[in-house]
Each structure stands twice: as C-alpha cells, then as structure tokens.
Image (cartoon, helix red, strand yellow):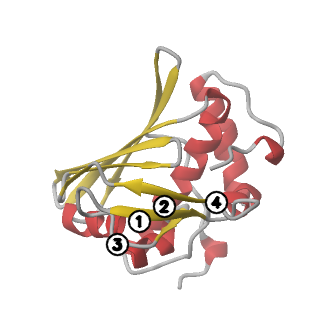
Amino acid sequence: MTDRLQYAPGPARGAQVRKDGEKWTLILVRELRHSPEKVWQALTDPAQLREWAPFDADGSLGTVGTTVKLTTVGAPALHVTETKVTRADPPKRLEYNWGDFDMRWELEALGGGTRLTLWTNIDRRFISMGAAGWHIAFDVLDHLLSGTPIGRIVGPEAMKFGGWQRLNAEYAKQFGVETPNSSSNAPKR
C-alpha cells in the first residue's frame, strides 16, 4: 500500500447537480487510465469494492436480477440494505439502489481509459458532502486500479481527512449551496 499521507485530493472538478421536481441528482465524471473492463470489475466485485467504495457488498453487482446486501461503511449503527441489480450491461452500464439512493454508473471507452459517470439522487443539504466523498473514493479507486492502493477513505474517516473539508467547501461554492458545518448533519445511509 502506498503511503496515505502522501495522498492529497486535487481541486473539486467533474461534478454537477440537477433538480428534477423535488429530486436532486449529483452527477460525477472521472476519467480513469484503465480499460472499461477493469473499471467494471472494480464496480461489481465485492473484494475490489471493499478497497474503495463506501459500502461492502456480499455478492457481485455484475448481473441483472441479483440481490445483494450492501453494508454502509462507517455508519453510526450497522446499516445493511438489500438491493437488486436493475441493469448490468458489462462493461458499459450498471444500475441498482443503495438504500434510498438510485445509483447509475456509465463507463465509456476513452482512448486507452474510461470516462466513468455516476448519477445518484441525494438530499440537497448534502450535495457538497456527497461530491467530496465520491471525489476521494474515485481517487482511491484510481490508485487501486493503478496498483498503488492507498486504502479506503470513506464515511466519518473521510470527513476527518484534511482534503475532504476543502473539497466540501469547493463543491458547495460551485453548486451554490451552504456547507454543512457539522458531522451530525451527515446523511444516514
């Protein structure tokens, strides 16, 4: 594992929000230097998810109709939700729910890499927090796929991470939202 102390997230980028009626959607785009097939594995394989994602999965997310239990990492109390994979078109599109959150992943081949896009609905009060958390998770994913893992940084651990506070403030400014000032305001998953 690469020394985590050397990791510093870059500036807030590649994120936007959309409002459809009362529903808010956070959209994050990241270009990765890895093939869609390799990224797909990291999005669906429980062993790889344990290295970067904010939840653990008890089975593969790679097959339509599969029911998987997702356990939120770092929740104040054990939080397990059952999800059914509603779409799995390897290595292009993956859709499922994580608790009350719709998760839609799109992978597009880009040169020798992948443009990864995540759409997830989110409470407007937590848009900047969610963007900051996913930003760091995507950085951790990129390190993992590059063979230089730095270990998962999610939940309350991510919120204590110096780069997270900066990202939260930068995304709040970009989105024109107030920055939540207390971890007690963190969304319950």
Discs 1/4, front = 4
Q: Are marks 4 and 3 in contact (CB under 8 Å)?
A: no
Q: Quadrant of residue 79?
A: bottom right
Residues at marks 4 and 2, CA–CA distance in whole angstroms: 25 Å
Which label was assigned to residue 139?
Answer: 2
Q: Are marks 1 and 2 in contact (CB under 8 Å)?
A: yes
Instruction: List x then y, in percent, for residue 150.
Output: 54, 76
In this picture, residue 66 sits left or right of residue 171? left
Query: Which residue position is annotated with label 3?
Result: 45
Q: Is residue 67 above or below residue 120?
A: below
Instruction: List x then y, in percent, for residue 22.
Output: 53, 17
Name the residue located 40 percent from the left edge and 74 percent from the top edge: 46
Name which residue type carries label 2.
Asp
Name which residue type carries label 4.
His
Q: Secondary structure at mark 3?
A: loop
- Judge by depth and name the residue closer to the eye, 1 or 38: 38
Instruction: List x then y, in percent, for residue 76.
Output: 76, 60
Query: Which residue position is annotated with label 4?
Result: 79
Q: Secondary structure at mark 2?
A: helix
Of marks 4 and 2, which one's residue comes earlier in the chain?
Answer: 4
Discs 4/3, front = 4
Of marks 4 and 3, which one's residue comes earlier in the chain?
Answer: 3
Of marks 1 and 3, which one's residue comes earlier in the chain?
Answer: 3
Q: Secondary structure at mark 4?
A: loop
Toward the bottom, the furthest residue is 1
Query: Which residue position is annotated with label 1?
Result: 142
The crowding category of the residue bearing disc 4, from other C-alpha atoms within 10 Å (few below 14, some 14 to 19, many at least 20), is some
- Judge by depth and name the residue closer to the eye, 166 or 40: 40
Q: Are marks 1 and 3 in contact (CB under 8 Å)?
A: no
